[in-house]
Each structure stands twice: as structure tokens, then as C-alpha cells.
Image (cartoon, grey):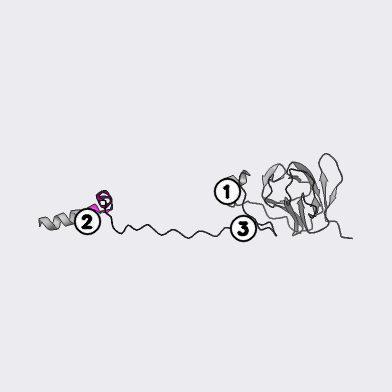
Amino acid sequence: MSEQLGQLDPVGGGDPIPLLKKELQIGRRSHCDITLRFPNVSSHHCLLTFKNGYWFVEDTNSRNGIKVNDVRCQQKYLLPGDTLSIAKHEYTIEYEPQGMEPPPDDEEDVMSMSLMEKAGLVSRKRDRETGRPITPKPKPPKPPKVIETPDDEALVWLLDDPEEEEQEQDESTS
């Protein structure tokens, strides 16, 4: 049998959920490592990974998101005793850290998500297998429009350079 790496204790009571693998998919589907059969939990809601001796949670494009200690986030290291909210279901994580140093500070890159994504109004496309965000390829810039035969006098007037006209007038008067 696998060594238990910790457990999730439901806040308000219930059976603890043992954390038996170093990577656990949490979601509503039966093939997830931890199945939460609630309608507000996404089919593949989040991923728990044991990294450098600490548990790390990452939202995998869920509709209702995750929170750590009542703060909505996309990803975060979890310390023993932290509260993890999956949709609106709260769990306290209990485990013994195995890392020699504390996990890195989770300075979230503020430019990594748009405000619409942060608010949960739109979602970024994600890889179906890994659940990781797909970075869209930048579109090539559009070439400038070239006007080949300006027939309209107003357009010609707008396109003319006033400095060239002054030079032409100076040359014709001298």
C-alpha cells in the first residue's frame, strides 16, 4: 500500500481524504484521483502536486475556481493547516512538510491572466491532457494599406505633405 502523504479534512466534518500519490487530479469525474460529486465542482477542477516536500494546488480551468485561505488563486503552495476551497467545498490540508526550506513565495504574475479571466468571466484554452494553459501564438502584424491611385481630391489633399508644397512654391517664385 502507498505511503500516505497527508490528508484533506472536510471543514464541518466528514471522512478525511488520504493523499496517496504525488500527483492527484481532483474533480467530479469518476476517473479523477479524488472524486467530489457536487454539481458546482468541474469535471477536472484542480491538480494537487507534491513538489519539493510541499503540496501545490493548481486550478485546471475550473468554472468555480479554487481558494486558499479564502483568497482566490490560480495556483499556490499549501502549508499544513491551510484551508483549500474547491468550488464552495472547504478542506483543511494536514501533512508533514518534507522540504528542508520553505516553499517559494507565491508572487503571482499579475500579467499572467486578464482581468476577465481573474473574475471568472472568460477562460483560457487549456491542453486536454495536462490541463495547462495554452499560450496562443501572436498574430503577425497586418501590412499597412497602400493607396495606389488617389482619385479623390480630398484624399490627395490629406496625403500631401505641406512642407513639400512650401518648397515647391519657394522654387517657383525664385
Q: Are marks 2 and 3 in contact (CB under 8 Å)?
A: no
Q: Which part of the image, by quadrant, shows the N terminus?
A: bottom right
Q: Identify which amino acid the numbered label 3 is placed on.
A: Ile
| Residue 24 in which image quadrant | bottom right
Q: Residue at x 85, y 47 (%)?
A: 16
Question: Mark 2 or 3 closer to N-term?
Answer: 3
Q: Residue furthest top?
A: 12
The residue sitting at 43% across, 58% down in the picture is 142
Asked whether the residues under the numbered discs 3 and 1 touch, taking CB atoms below 8 Å apart as contact, a structural biologist would say no
Question: In the picture shown, does residue 66 fall above or below 25?
Answer: above
Residue placed under numbered mark 1 in the picture: 114
Query: Which circle's residue, 3 or 1, is located before the other in the chain?
Result: 1
**Residue of label 2:** 164
**What secondary structure is marked by label 3?**
loop
**Residue count near mark 2 (Cα–Cα under 10 Å), binned few <14, some 14–19, many ≥20:** few
Residues shaded magenta: 134-162
Residue 122 on the magenta segment: no
Three-letter amino acid code at disc 2?
Glu
Is 174 located above or below residue 115 in the figure?
below
| Residue positioned 25% across, 54% down in the render | 161
Residue closer to the observer: 73 or 140: 140
Q: Position of residue 91 (x, y in %)?
A: 79, 45
Residue position for label 3: 134
Which image quadrant: the C terminus? bottom left
